Amino acid sequence: MTDDRKVKIAWKDVHKGFGGKPVLRGLDLEAYEGRSLVVIGGSGTGKSVTIKTALGLLAPDSGVVEIDGQAVRPGRIDDPGVSQIGMLFQSGALFDSLPVWENVAFRLIHSEKVARKEAKDRAIEALGQVDLDADTGNKRPSELSGGMLKRAALARAIVAKPNILFFDEPTTGLDPITADVINRLISRLVRKMGATAVSITHDMASMRIIADDVAMIHEGRIIWKGTLDQVDTADDDRVRAFVEGRSEPAEG
């Protein structure tokens, strides 16, 4: 039952299209406070657009996204909802020209105006939380492996101790062992922080480690949502087919 849970983020009848082509077609979804929601679905179904509307990077054509009951105001850096968010981008999106610690501390220095020494100390602390040492903080992103880059990007996402964390395909490009490490690290950090987490992925191993709740998006709408332990017995065969890696729903 979800009646006792507090809704942290709500997408309400959200429509969004590009060049006359609809992507989100009346998306309704809730992420609950202190829980980890994983949105699954194939390529081009609207997963990334869903996150970008909550981040305020894209304005819905109609409908609304709310954080703590207040509408997200796209493009407004003073939006009280968006200021709670930490984001792990699919590519990592680190600046090659900056040392790793300064990448991690970028928000603290440039948005929160934290003094550089304090920002560096907090960045090194965040790196320690993702099992990277201070020496790594002094390296350039180009000197790190794919798994270390992902950890550094995760440190940047958590350094400001956000109440909300977004993860965009967190294991893309990683080998299975490294992906498993990142998944378990994300799960551990989200629970330790008590944050609300929203992840988008097509990686079912990721889903099974990270998720408390699961929603499947198909053709711009949520076609199923439930808890992780309900996903294998979902009443929509499109969901079971996706989770099982089948190309077509089972017959009969």
Image (tube, rainbow, N blue to C red):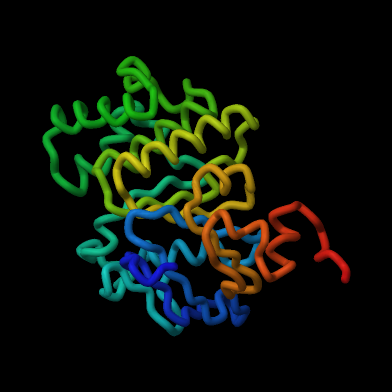
Which residue is found at the position 62% from the left and 42% from the top? 205
**Placement of 46 over or under 153, stated as above or below:** below
How many discs appear? 0
Q: Residue at x 61, y 73 (%)?
A: 223
Residue positioned 39% across, 65% down in the render? 54
Residue 80 falls in image quadrant? bottom left
- Which quadrant, please, contains the C terminus? bottom right
- Left or right: residue 53 versus residue 6 is right
> Where is residue 29 drawn, in percent x and y?
47, 71
Rendered residue at 26%/56% (across/down): 84
| Quadrant placement of the N terminus | bottom left
On the image, which quarter does residue 220 sit in?
bottom right
- Decide if residue 116 is on the left or right side of residue 68: left
Instruction: Looking at the picture, tell me which residue is in the foreground, 111 or 51.
Output: 51
Q: Position of residue 174 (x, y in %)?
A: 60, 34
Considering every residue shown, the one lying at the far right of the view is: 251
